[in-house]
Image: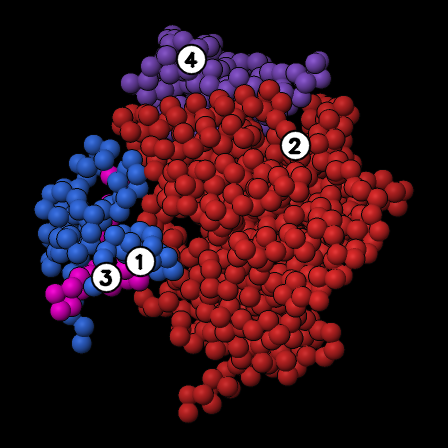
Chain colours: A blue, B purple, C red
Amino acid sequence: MATPASQMLTANRLPDGQVLYWRGGEWVLELADGEVFTDPKSADAALAAAARFVEKNEVVATYLFDVRVVAGRIVPVKEREIIRAAGPSVRPDLGKQAAHVQV
Amino acid sequence: MPLIKNGAFAKDPFIFVPEGKAFPEDMGVMVTLERFQSERENIFAHNMPVAVKLASSENPEVLKGDLPRIAAIAIEFPIFRDGRGFSWARMLRTRLGYTGEIRAVGHFLFDQLAFMVRVGFDAFEVRQDFRIEDFTRAMGEMHYVYQPSADGKKTVFDLRAVK
Amino acid sequence: MYRYDEFDAAMVADRVAQFRYQVERRLAGALSEDEFKPLRLKNGLYLQLHSYMLRIAIPYGTLSAQQLRKFAYIARTYDRGYGHFTTRQNLQFHWPRLVDVPDILAELASVEMHCIQTSGNCIRNVTADQFAGAIAGEIEDPRILSEIVRQWSTFHPEFSYLPRKFKIAVSGTTHDRAAVKFHDIGIEIIKNDAGETGYRVFVGGGMGRTPYVGLEIGRFVAPEDILAYLEACMRVYNEYGRRDNIYKARVKILAHQLGADEFRRQAELEFAEIKKAGTLQLPERELARIAAYFAPPEFENLPEESPEFDAALANRDFANWAKTNLTPHRAKGYAIATISLKAIGATPGDASADQMDALAQLMDDFGYEEIRVTHEQNLVLPHVKKRDLPVIFARLKMLDLATANAGLITDIICCPGLDYCDLANARSIPIAQAIQQRFADLERQHELGELKIKMSGCINACGHHHAGHIGILGVDKKGVEFYQIQLGGSGAEDASVGEIMGPGFGKDEIVDAIERVVDAYLKLRMDGERLLDTYRRVGMAPFKNMVYQEQLHAAY
């Protein structure tokens, strides 16, 4: 039986469109570094706090999305968010995934 | 709300009188189409300038016979993307030959102003913080136009013909 | 091809300055995102899954070498080294930064290009037959009217805030390569009994949630009346198109709800007034000026047969390519060459900066003024001497641009899908690639003949799946990517909307399902039939039975 989903908060940086993830009142580039909310109240509080970054014209399109933590790894529930966090699945040389070094 | 008329801030000669409210003595009155149609003679008997406010779904053709007696027509934009008002204004100016004030009210963007002027709007109810320099700027952004409209501005095709 | 005069150039320059100011205001916070979004959309700038996306207008799909080079330059300087050609003959860049877009627009303006009205609720890029000016039997080059419509529709003050987007396409031959019947307005150039040229106007075609074939509204519109007629149709739509529901806002809904007769009646009332006022009559001189830009190049007086071409056919690769990628030209000794952007395993419709530069160089070397983009996401060199084809082929081969699959099963029309697009429900590109790999064997492809697969990653149908002989629609089934098959669509003059076959398939099953459709076709077909023809003869049932029966058997 699947554990209930947790949530994360994402947005796009206004000047360049870069995908961002919320962590403790600021934004990081990598999903793996982002903050996971295990209860809806803290998720909603973060979404509300993110509004000031929208007002300051730093980010756009803030929203919450579902994730699960599996063996210490954050895995988005929806395929869309997996792709958004990594880059186009058909071009491993593009997007955030391109920066990752394969060991 | 601040009113821009003929490119400058102007005092609004009309007051909008909601349904059921009495007309003030000494001002032009603006009423909805519905009120105009049900109280027509009463409104004209008021003996001050009359303005009719149209919703975006209301075709101004229904006012055809009364146009000489209507000083201004306000066309509402409930949201900037509802572009019906552009067609209504053009119709008033060209097909119906209306020479009174056509006013844009409601929600519209600075970047729509130049198009509005082209189709026949000559007055705009704007936001409190609107600057007249922005209006002037909007008018000057595009030097040429490709297609004829109510403003009678010469098109690129006209300009090419005389070269 | 058309060249800007000082007025066209000023128009585009003014637009760049306007957008630069809009971006400034946005970054400074004088414009909110809600206020800025419609403005950036009118310059083709979307916010997508990973980043912004910029859509460049390629009017009626015609490009010069200089413009192609500029694309390559922009791809390298401002993006990730490639561009994507779309089903509306446009180009998309998938990684621009907002702060760079004003400069990108300025670069484009320097080569007479722009991103004007490539999105938003306005009249979009006018598309036309990619073989314009080259194909035999053409009544009139459709790009002449397309250019006239482009100018008339650019910054139209009355029609820039329509209920929804508006797409126009023009075809100049009986065989329709522009899918005019699937456009909001489709124009077919025809001759009447008196031999005069005129326009047949269809209104209300479209894809998406509710696909429709366009209704004939204007039976024969005289050339001097066409702008007035179009303006009349647009006015009816702007005034009465639905604005209460975004999914019911296209003109196809209004036109089919009113019916052809009533829509025509309203349009003709409006048309009569506009004609009376005489304001949209295009002067003869202007018509001639624009038409002159589309006069075909001087064709050399060549024999039909070319010894160089015939000798090269001994090379199997060249022979295969010649078989599918060449179309007969109206001039003796010439051919129309289709450059496939569907290499097996590549992203359909993508071209790298290197490929674009190399193509521009090839054009310069051979003196080709134009290259065309097709709405099936391929490129076309319209006027190639047959004797030059072996050398052209060799150069294309070195660039991975010689895939010999034009019109075959691996020539798949495919939207970017969930790999790129914010609207998508499922990925489309990897499925297209997997289908290509399954059918990579060229002999097998030839056995199947003309077979148009069109694939969309969501119901917005940018991949035109409703018009595919086989259409594939990606859906989200309880969070899992799922694929629905349709059969029998066609975007040609015999336009038809494909029929849904039945329950969908998971991403690990879809390629097998497509293979079973193909096997069914091979079992059922009679001489010379394409899959589309077989489907039209036998209907869905035999296909459905074989596909789902086989699936049942396979499960055991």
Q: Which residues are magenta?
A: A59-82
Which residue is identified by label 1?
A: A83
Which residue is identified by label 3?
A: A102
Label 2: chain letter: C
The residue type indicated by label 3 comes to: Gln
Residue at screen point 60% across, 20% down: C6
Q: Residues within 10 Å of mark 1 (few under 14, many from 20)?
A: many
Q: Work out whether C67 lies above or below C514.
A: above
Residue at screen point 20% across, 32% down: A56
Q: Which mark is residue B136?
A: 4
Label 4 secondary element:
helix
Q: Residues within 10 Å of mark 2 (few under 14, many from 20)?
A: some
Q: Mark 2 to mark 4: distance in Å?
A: 33 Å
Q: Residues within 10 Å of mark 3 (few under 14, many from 20)?
A: few
Can you give x and y, in whole percent of width and height, for residue C496 in the image?
64, 62
Q: Are marks 1 and 2 in contact (CB under 8 Å)?
A: no
Q: Main secondary structure of the magenta part?
A: strand
Q: Mark 2 to mark 3: distance in Å?
A: 50 Å
In the depicted view, which residue is nearer to us: A8 or C262? A8
Label 3: chain letter: A
The magenta stretch spans residue A67: yes
Q: Mark 4 to mark 3: distance in Å?
A: 57 Å
Label 1: chain letter: A
Point out the frontmost of discs 2 and 4: 2
Residue at screen point 71% across, 46% down: C383
Point out the frontmost of discs 4 and 3: 3
